[in-house]
Image (cartoon, rainbow, N blue to C red):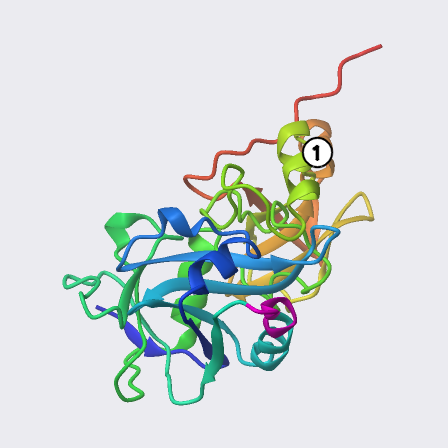
């Protein structure tokens, strides 16, 4: 059972009589379907539908826990406070909480809400996050990166830039991070339109290189034309945020796709339901 303490994470606790209704009307995740012991991805969008903040949401006693980037925690707190108005809600950064992750875990989630199962990954893998205990790591953080890559699980800032991506771009619609049934949330109109019209063209794909991949941020190109950007990297594997229509054109034409000068193969993550666009019909 690999286990490590993640760096660069922070926890916000949202508590109070109106906590769940307050968040339900703001964030992309459907809290009505969030079970105790589960963790789901989510985001707070701007009115144009782009991701301002990403987080992992789970239940914590009678409130809710937002596991987010340490660099974003204070700004997320300020943004949520702007929406608070007269709601009976208390929002605070938990400065003492640590974030641990393990997988291939036989014990799984606990009834105490401090240990939750990460639903971004297949159930058989049993990925678990824990929010109590002392720092402890028996594997390097690169193993966690490799696990995320293998299952197409994107995280800012390595895989995309906050403020510059829609939920569909980073596959939140595939991992339970955005709901199209719960009703309004900030940016909902734009995101729902993308869903129903099928206009999502950027996606996170799994990148496999012919050799070790170059650094995060390297351009992905086809026929010397940029079609995306390389994100998280672990050896010859990585994630890329790419235009899937341009990837399909390159595949249909037999044009090599490169990350820097390294030939690469691009694949849809396992268990994701989207497909490459259909070939353009002849006039």
Helix, strand or loop for disc 1: loop
Residue 213 visible (yes or no) = no
Q: Is residue 3 left or right of residue 217?
A: left
Which of 125 and 29 lies nearest the eye of the viewer? 29
Q: Left or right? Give the position of 114 relative to 160.
A: left
Residue at the spot x=39%, y=48% of the render?
A: 32
Q: Residue at x 53, y 49 (%)?
A: 172
Q: Residues within 10 Å of mark 1 (few under 14, many from 20)?
A: few
- In this rendering, would 132 be left or right of 254? left
Compare residues 202 and 217 and report the one nearer the observer: 202
| Number of numbered discs overlaid on the protein picture | 1
What type of secondary structure mainly makes up the magenta span? helix
Q: Closer to the camera, 98 or 187? A: 187
* Residue lying furthest top: 283
Q: Position of residue 63 (x, y in %)?
A: 36, 68
Residue 39: horizontal and vertical position, in percent? 36, 59
Left-right relation of 270 to 122: right
Q: Was residue 85 drawn as part of the magenta stretch in this picture? A: yes
Q: Which residue is mark 1?
A: 199
Q: Quadrant of the C terminus?
A: top right
Specify whether residue 37 is painted magenta. Answer: no
Q: Position of residue 196 (x, y in %)?
A: 63, 29
Residue furthest out toward the left = 107
Instruction: Tell me if I can see residue 203 in this picture.
Output: yes
Q: Please, is residue 25 above or below residue 72 in the view?
A: above
Q: Is residue 58 above or below residue 101?
A: above
The percent coordinates of residue 25 (x first, y second) are 55, 53
Look at the image and tell me in which quarter the N terminus lies.
bottom left
Is 27 above or below relative to 217? above
* Highlighted magenta segment, given as a residue range: 80-86
């Amino acid at each position: 059972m690999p286990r490590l303490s993640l760096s660069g994470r922070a926890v916000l606790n949202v508590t109070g009589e109106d906590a769940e209704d307050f968040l339900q009307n703001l964030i992309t995740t459907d809290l009505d379907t969030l079970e105790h012991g589960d963790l789901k991805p989510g985001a707070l969008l701007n009115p144009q539908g782009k991701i301002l903040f990403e987080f992992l949401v789970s239940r914590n006693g009678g409130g809710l826990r937002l596991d987010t980037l340490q660099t974003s925690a204070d700004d997320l707190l300020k943004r949520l406070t702007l929406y608070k108005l007269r709601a009976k809600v208390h929002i605070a950064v938990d400065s003492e909480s640590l974030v641990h992750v393990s997988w291939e875990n036989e014990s799984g989630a606990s009834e105490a809400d401090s240990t939750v199962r990460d639903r971004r990954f297949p159930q058989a893998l049993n990925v678990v996050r824990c929010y109590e205990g002392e720092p402890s790591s028996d594997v390097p953080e690169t193993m966690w990166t490799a696990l995320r890559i293998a299952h197409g699980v994107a995280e800012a800032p390595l895989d995309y830039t906050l403020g510059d991506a829609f939920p569909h771009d980073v596959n939140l619609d595939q991992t339970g991070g955005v709901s199209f049934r719960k009703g309004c949330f900030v940016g909902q109109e734009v995101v729902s339109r993308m869903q129903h019209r099928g206009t999502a063209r950027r996606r996170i794909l799994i990148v496999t290189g012919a050799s070790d991949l170059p650094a995060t941020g390297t351009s992905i190109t086809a026929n010397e034309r940029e079609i995306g950007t390389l994100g998280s990297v672990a050896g010859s594997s990585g994630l890329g945020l790419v235009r899937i229509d341009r990837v399909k054109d390159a595949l249909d034409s037999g044009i090599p796709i490169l990350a820097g000068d390294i030939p690469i193969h691009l694949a849809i993550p396992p268990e994701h339901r989207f497909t490459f666009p259909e070939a353009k019909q002849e006039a």
